[in-house]
Image (cartoon, helix red, strand yellow):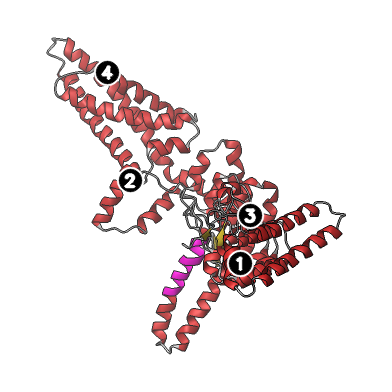
């Protein structure tokens, strides 16, 4: 990724340029008085004339003019150049063009301090000045560097510059003509910033800060989607045209076109709508974590993104939806199918999961971290409600079966403990049945505990659903305690069975097994 040319440390003041700076700064102060137009025009003309005089005085030494403009700094804190000052204080276009004519490299010079990384293009776009933006883009000798410089200063938090890139600023200012201008000059719509956010990620974060602008943000989102597909279709058309010009075999053309089509989809559509940032969040997931249910509903209806073409049988129309990000099971299957299955890759994946259990969190899981009042608007969405009901219908029999099995295990565990006490404390020779019963139950409980432990290992290693992540995703402390108590029961039961088979008995493990297993029983009874 390219970065802008960083301003050098300030040198001793250039008195001539300092005087010009003072004039344009004074001009900005006069603009505050709306009714006073004459001094403003006078100062603007004066700044223009002083710059021209400066150029005329050193016309025989163009290198000196360029060097002095490059080294002059208006501010020791931000290392602003005269060009930065001209844009900041709304100098006339002619004045800015005069600077660019003699020192175009100043365009890529960035500010420092709280404005770190900001160049004049960032500033012009944030001001919404499309004419100035055109002047800067046309004067730039390195547009790629200019368009890919990140403004990462601390003062940009919670502002239209929070997305760091010039294109993201245009998106947050909700100026479609500015976006078109940047794209025409080579800006990549799928560019990400230092946090892995593309412009849609940034727009979702901005919507959280400016909820009153959500209707306008939704319009911008629809505009971006149209632009994405326009670029996608243009790429496909160009690929077909290139193949035709090269006179390639028709069958090869079809194959290559399909390959290119998939790659284009991945490069544009996938990287815009399904790309994860550093926090493993896609734009759709951001609408969930940020409470943007209005935008969530709009996204789910976007054709060829989440809403896919269906079938019409003459009476009914069938809709298809991409639920990969919504449902954790679908998301896990997708991740597994798209992961390299080589032995080394699997081994590395297991090691990585043990050390760094971070994984993408589905929309439904994110909703579990919210209280019901915040999650309720999302469940007014028919798609989300349908998925939740389908999952419940699919797994409810397993839920009931697990509840019955656990109740039976706790019952035979309690009775076997009673029988074992009778066997130990009795000298009666008619206790053979109790002895055999307690030994059989030990093996049943041991196998049950191993099953629970293996399920937990599967959740941690393959589903990446660790206890730590589970606690972070669920506001209800009881949800975490239920899972923890089951795991505690399994380990203590396994240890208790092991010691019992060796002929010893531990009151501590027995009581822990009894209490943790009994507490988990309430998990199945909580909705009754």
Q: Which residue is identified by label 1? A: 226
Q: Where residue 462 sits in the image (x, y, percent)?
A: 33, 47
Q: Which residue is identified by label 3? A: 74
Q: Which residue is identified by label 4? A: 508
Query: What secondary structure is found at the residue carrying circle 1?
Result: helix
For label 4, the crowd category at 10 Å Cα-Cα, with few meaning under 14, some 14 to 19 and many 20 or more, is: few
The residue lying toward the viewer, choosing from 15 and 254, is 15
Count of labels shown?
4
For label 2, the crowd category at 10 Å Cα-Cα, with few meaning under 14, some 14 to 19 and many 20 or more, is: some
The residue lying toward the viewer, choosing from 31 and 394, is 31
Mark toward the start of the polypeptide (3 vs 1)? 3
For label 1, the crowd category at 10 Å Cα-Cα, with few meaning under 14, some 14 to 19 and many 20 or more, is: few
Query: What secondary structure is found at the residue carrying circle 2?
Result: helix
Relative placement, left or right, of 201 versus 392 is: right
Q: Real-space Cα distance between discs 4 and 1?
A: 65 Å
Q: Real-space Cα distance between discs 3 and 1?
A: 43 Å
Residue sitting at 57 percent across and 49 percent down? Answer: 287
**Residue 115 visible in image:** yes
Residue sitting at 24 percent across and 29 percent down? Answer: 494
Quarter occupied by residue 259? bottom left
Q: Where residue 376 sits in the image (x, y, percent)?
A: 60, 41
Q: Which residues are magenta?
A: 259-272
Of tags 2 and 4, the one toward the viewer is 2
* Residue 86 is a magenta residue: no
* Residue 264 is a magenta residue: yes
**Residue 131 visible in image:** no
For label 3, the crowd category at 10 Å Cα-Cα, with few meaning under 14, some 14 to 19 and many 20 or more, is: many
- Residue 353 numbered tag: 2
């Amino acid at each position: 990724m390219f970065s802008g040319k960083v301003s050098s440390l300030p040198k001793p003041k250039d008195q001539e340029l300092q005087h010009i700076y003072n004039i344009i700064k004074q001009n900005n102060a006069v603009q505050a008085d709306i009714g006073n137009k004459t001094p403003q025009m006078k100062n603007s003309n004066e700044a223009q004339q002083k710059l021209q005089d400066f150029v005329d005085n050193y016309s025989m030494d163009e290198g000196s003019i360029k060097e002095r403009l490059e080294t002059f700094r208006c501010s020791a804190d931000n290392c602003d150049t005269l060009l930065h000052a001209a844009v900041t204080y709304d100098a006339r276009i002619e004045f800015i063009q005069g600077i660019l004519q003699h020192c175009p490299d100043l365009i890529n010079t960035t500010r420092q301090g709280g404005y770190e990384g900001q160049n004049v293009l960032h500033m012009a776009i944030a001001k919404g000045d499309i004419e100035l933006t055109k002047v800067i883009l046309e004067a730039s000798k390195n547009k790629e560097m200019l368009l890919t410089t990140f403004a990462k200063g601390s003062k940009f938090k919670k502002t239209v510059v929070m997305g760091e890139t010039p294109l993201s600023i245009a998106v947050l200012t909700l100026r479609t003509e500015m976006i078109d201008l940047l794209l025409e000059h080579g800006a990549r719509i799928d560019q990400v910033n230092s946090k892995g956010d593309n412009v849609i990620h940034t727009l979702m974060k901005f919507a959280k800060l400016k909820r009153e602008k959500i209707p306008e943000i939704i319009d911008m989102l629809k505009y971006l989607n149209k632009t994405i597909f326009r670029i996608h279709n243009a790429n496909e058309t160009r690929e077909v045209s290139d193949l035709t010009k090269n006179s390639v075999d028709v069958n090869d053309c079809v194959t290559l076109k399909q390959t290119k089509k998939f790659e284009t989809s991945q490069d544009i559509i996938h990287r815009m709508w399904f790309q994860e940032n550093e926090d493993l969040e896609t734009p759709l997931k951001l609408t969930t974590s940020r409470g943007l249910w209005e935008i969530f509903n709009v996204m789910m209806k976007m054709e060829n993104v989440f809403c896919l073409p269906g079938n019409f049988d003459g009476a009914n129309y069938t809709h298809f939806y991409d639920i990969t990000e919504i449902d954790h099971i679908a998301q896990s299957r997708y991740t597994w199918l798209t992961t390299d299955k080589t032995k080394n890759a699997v081994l590395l994946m297991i090691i990585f999961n043990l050390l760094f259990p971070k994984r993408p969190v589905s929309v439904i899981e994110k909703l579990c971290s919210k209280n019901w009042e915040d999650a309720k608007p999302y469940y007014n969405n028919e798609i989300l409600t349908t998925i939740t009901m389908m999952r419940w219908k699919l797994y409810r029999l397993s839920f009931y079966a697990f509840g019955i099995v656990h109740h039976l295990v706790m019952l035979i565990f309690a009775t076997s403990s009673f029988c074992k006490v009778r066997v130990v404390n009795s000298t009666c020779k008619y206790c053979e049945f109790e002895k055999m019963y307690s030994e059989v139950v030990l093996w049943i409980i041991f196998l049950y505990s191993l099953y629970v432990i293996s399920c937990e290992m599967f959740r941690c290693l393959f589903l990446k659903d660790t206890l730590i992540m589970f606690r972070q995703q669920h506001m209800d402390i009881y949800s975490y305690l239920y899972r923890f108590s089951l795991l505690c029961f399994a380990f203590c039961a396994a240890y208790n069975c092991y010691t019992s088979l060796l002929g010893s008995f531990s009151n501590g493990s027995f009581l822990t097994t009894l209490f943790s297993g009994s507490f988990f029983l309430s998990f199945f009874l909580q909705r009754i």
